[in-house]
Amino acid sequence: MHKQGLKLAYSFAVLNAVIIGFSFLFTKVALVHAGPLDTLTFRFAASFAVMSVPVALGWVKVSYRGKPIGRALLLAAMYPLGFFTLQVFGLQRATSAEGGILYSFTPVVTMIIAAIFLKEKTTLLQKLCIFLSVFGVVFIFVMKGSGIQLSNMTGIVLLFMTCLAFAGYSVLARSLSSHFSPAELSYLMMGVGFATFLIISLTGHTVSGTLGEFLNPLGSATFVLSAVYLGVVASLVTTLTSTYILSKIEASLMSVFTNLSTIVSIAAGAVFLGEQITVYHWIGSFLIIAGVIGTNLLGRKKTAAASAAASE
């Protein structure tokens, strides 16, 4: 059963990378029709509404009584609140390429935070594999001619803080997985995300006198489709699967999968936007995949060795 759970966790980790890879494309489409905060509001409205149906019908049981709700709210403050707010304002002040480069450092930041707070240990070879996957992403962006412009310093700092927010979320979600079910954590996070972004968005419209325009994006079928993808698939599905993954494998092992989303976004750009794929894309993708496989294979060997030593 444990092996089956582990297989499912790895399948979910790959699925999440694919979903996140496509989410960049849908975010670009959504932002044509609405501002960043309105997009986030409709995104989380979709995810919270969809999850409220099975909860209201009693198909999914959620109970928060006697559980560490304060720590769960801190989790929601890191992700989705902190992560998406920092990302939106970071991308307004820096390029999406800089966002991609900085996001690739998430596994390194997660590894450090998980070592401090969860006492997760990674071997030297695992550390090298994590850095290999990060190097693969950076290599693709640098070869594309994208670097980090120090003139965009505010945006760069905000985007780096998204790494910290996601790493903090991964570590805290792993420690909370023994208290809450994936559905309970996900429902709380979607609800907090929707309520907070709705209040901020409506306040912004009221101040600028554009409250009548708040629902305008819903007149576009393209925007609605993008919001549903971002809310239901890219937020709700990935949150449910992430909390499941973190109950089965270490935070540092899960986070390295985030770099696979770079490969997916390259493929999505080629198929849907006609972007060109070059030799350096293939080389970078190979390095990313090698790093992800290496980190996790070595992680399983380490776990197997530890269990063998414990049983002797």
Image (cartoon, rainbow, N blue to C red):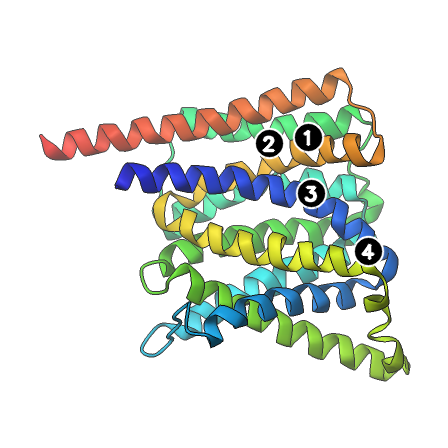
| Residue carrying label 3 | 22
Q: CA distance from mark 1 to mark 3?
A: 19 Å
Farthest left residue in view: 312
Q: Reading the chain from its start, which is encountered first: label 3 or label 2?
A: 3
Under mark 4, the amino acid is Thr
Residue hosting label 1? 138
Residue 149 in picture, x, y percent from top left: 82, 40
**Pointers 4 and 1 in contact (CB under 8 A)?**
no
Q: Nearer the viewer, mark 4 or mark 1?
A: 4
Residue 122 on image: x %, y % = 38, 34
Q: Which residue is mark 2?
A: 134
**Residue 219 position in % (x across, y down):** 85, 67
Q: Which x, y percent locates residue 208?
A: 89, 80
Seen at 75% across and 54% down, the residue is: 90
Question: SS class of the residue under badge 2?
Answer: helix
Residue 188 visible within the image: no
CA distance separating discs 3 and 2 = 19 Å
